[in-house]
Image: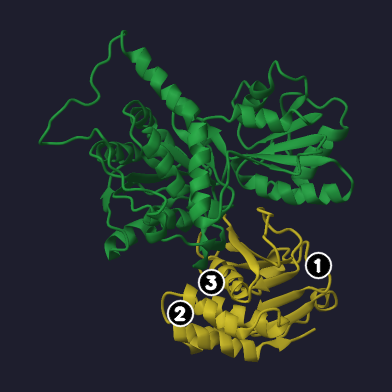
Amino acid sequence: MIEIRTHGRGGQGSVIASEILADAFFHEGKFVQAFPAFGVERRGAPVMAFTRVSDSEVRERCQIYEPDHLIVLDPVLIETVNITEGLKEGGWIIINTNKPVENSNLTSRFHVAIVDANRIALDHGLGSRSAPIVNTSIVGAFAGATKLVGIEAVKKAIDGFVPLKKEHNIQAAVDAYNGVQIVS
Amino acid sequence: MKKVIMGNHAVSYGVRASEAQVISAYPITPQTHIVELLSEMCGNGEINAKFIKVESEHSAMAACIGASAAGTRAFTATSSQGLLLMHEMLHWAVGARLPIVLANVNRAVGPPWSIWTDQNDSLSQRDVGWFQIYCESNQETQDTVPQAFKIAEQLQMPVMLVLDAFFLSHTYEIVDIIEKEQVRKFLPPYNPEIKIDTKDPHSFGNLAGPDMYMELRYMIQEAMEKGLDVIKKVDDEFREVFGRGYGLIEPYRCDDAEIILVTSGTVASTTRAVIDAMRGEGVAIGALKIRVFRPFPFEEIFAVLSKAKKVAVIDRNISFGCHGIFFQEIKSALYGRTDIPVLGYIAGLGGRDVTPGVIREIAENAISNKNPERYINWIGVKR
């Protein structure tokens, strides 16, 4: 089973990202589960969401405490929340940032990949400058860095899940898939 | 068609396929998605039902009572404080013998406010006379809706299906979505013998004196007792059409188990993963999921548990001043027929996570602790 934890802030689309990711794996024939850690939901508050992927039915119905991989939608969370808590050695951390990651604590123990999902989202007219919607870009970046799921499955998932601007969202995912940089 | 959908929407698809005719509800987290999608379906014609907006849950149930008395298939959904506000009308639906179906998302009761899951909202309605069916997956949740209508309409009794907040309601997973064309093979149109009719007026809900009231209560109990067989039969009929069934209870690796963990809802699902892990270590352990809580399947439960040496019940609920509520029922299912020790564990109140680690802690306590409390062992509580 692959367990993925997504960290973001209310309004960035973390929950939808976890769902699109699950749906993409479903299109490749996997059993999947995705759900949010429901807290006091406000715009800007730290939020978490979870995705499980398996070759057999997923039976665990609880939060993920020892994820295989992480998705981080706001790089500031790295400094404020212990995001790597429980993360398995050698797991992927996909970070939305426009700055290089020099934190050797992360790069020595985990595979780190970065993508400027804010810019990609804005290039495709997703969200506003103060609140870009980065969920579709980050899922594309996850697929591009980890190669655990194909971009065609991601496109299909976005097409099914996103109610508006489907084409823009799909293009954003493709750009992030191609543009993601592997740091370690 | 298989799709990745949330538990709440699984309920909505089940209602659509069952061709409910009247839907009345008041929004409440974490249930709102159920009726939001249904209202959309009413709007775009996917379902030919009247959606009645109301100002409270009490009114929502009152609207369902009127609709059902008029001979239509009626549905509502609620949660926690909303279910509690319906309480008076829940009794009414039973006494009037109206086959309404209600989906309750298990949410802890305030104060203090909580939006997270536990079972005290539905279990506090234990004695009103509604059937109660606890679901553990989105597929089961969807499939239980048409089953609930069929059970309800055969017995003229209301049925509540119950799903955990967030761990089901907001969880996306794969569901084979059922369509009304298939469900028609399983669920005939609702056409009651007696209904409100302006052309043939009768009194409904009239006074029953001491010479009659008790007989009407007896008939409700009779319907409940018949209910166990009806649920099994309906489940078999569902399996014939859809290839899936769920039973009254679901034993897992119980045949040679020395200790059996009794669970319900999503905890039942996580428990199976723990059972497999512990079996791998050579522990003779099994699990029993209670799906149908009212009517309570005493005989089926006794048949499974009486072969074990010890039983541990995990309750995501509590009857204050007494014990866990499933624990009480399990004890009474075994009373006077066996001396197997039954241990009670309270876990996961107010949405606290019941992880494989928590379930293992309970199992290990029940196995090795020489003196676990018989009645209440609190798991993970800070004192």
Q: Which residue is mark 1?
A: A88
Above or below, A85 relative to B202:
below
B75 or A161: nearer the viewer: B75
Contact between marks 3 and 2 (CB within 8 A): the answer is no
- Give the residue type that dot 2 points to: Ser
**Rendered view: A92 above or below A67:** below
Q: Residues within 10 Å of mark 3 (few under 14, many from 20)?
A: many
**Residue B32 horizontal/vertical position (percent):** 42, 52
Q: Position of residue A89 (x, y in %)?
A: 84, 70
Which tint was used for chain A?
Answer: yellow
Q: Nearer the viewer, mark 1 or mark 3?
A: 1
Q: CA distance from mark 1 to mark 2?
A: 35 Å
Q: Earlier in the sequence, mark 3 or mark 2?
A: 3
In the rendered image of the structure, the colour used to display chain B is green
B179 left or right of B361?
left
* Residue type, mark 3 in image: Gln
Q: Quadrant of residue A30?
A: bottom right
Residue B118 rendering spot, x and y as whole percentages: 58, 40
Q: Is residue A132 visible?
A: no
Which type of secondary structure does the marked residue at label 2 adopt? loop
Tell me what residue is drawn at x 29 percent, y 59 percent: B42
For label 2, the residue is A128
Q: Which residue is mark 3?
A: A12
Residue drawn at x 35%, y 46% is B26
The span from disc 1 to disc 3 (Cα, nearest Å) is 25 Å
Q: Is residue B273 visible?
A: yes
Q: Residue at x 37, y 29 (%)?
A: B94
Q: Earlier in the sequence, mark 1 or mark 3?
A: 3
